[in-house]
Image (spheres, rainbow, N blue to C red):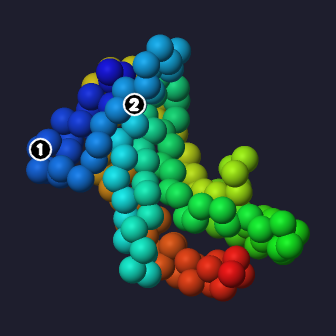
Amino acid sequence: MNTKAKVFKKYLKEKEVTVFQVEEVPDDEQNTVTFQSHIQVEGQQLPLMVILDDSAFTVIRVLILNNALKQDKDVQLLYMTNTQNMNYKPFKLFYDRNGALIMDVCMTTIGDKEKDFATLGDEIYGMFNLIIKFLEANYRQWMKEIW
């Protein structure tokens, strides 16, 4: 398990947070570990994943909606996500190969020793709060656009 993942796992244990499923990606050059859970927005449970590896970055990924990109609305929906991406610096929306709408937040987390990541847990949880506020402000409008 990479150092960032060890530190975050320790943070979760200290805070008695038990909502994450932890998975080490086998045979991965970056020693990737995912922490999977969900957040609730507008009554919906949205899958959330914290991706920690040996790179200088930490990614928080939220699955907004499966099969969101519809062929009859693709230009409109791509315009919507592009507009969001231009207006909100930390949040990047994209569609995966299957048309799922995903939001990534990429955080810089540089270091290689545990002491380098002393505030990592608080930083990730601080970002969770921003993500939830952002989704609560935008989710309903996105669903109107998609449907």
Q: Are marks 2 and 1 in contact (CB under 8 Å)?
A: no
| Residue of label 2 | 33
Residue at 45 percent across and 38 percent down: it is 51
Residue at 27 percent across and 28 percent down: it is 6
Q: Earlier in the sequence, mark 2 or mark 1?
A: 1
Q: Is residue 90 visible?
A: no
Q: In the image, is 34 to the left or to the right of 89?
A: left
The image quadrant of residue 129 is: bottom left
Residue type marked 1: Glu
Residue type marked 2: Val
Q: Is residue 2 above or below residue 126?
A: above
Q: Is residue 53 above or below residue 64?
A: above
Q: In the image, is 79 to the left or to the right of 109?
A: right
Q: Position of residue 106 (x, y in %)?
A: 55, 46
Q: Position of residue 100 (x, y in %)?
A: 64, 58
Q: Nearer the viewer, mark 2 or mark 1?
A: 2
| Residue of label 1 | 14
In which quadrant of the rendered image does the N terminus lie?
Answer: top left
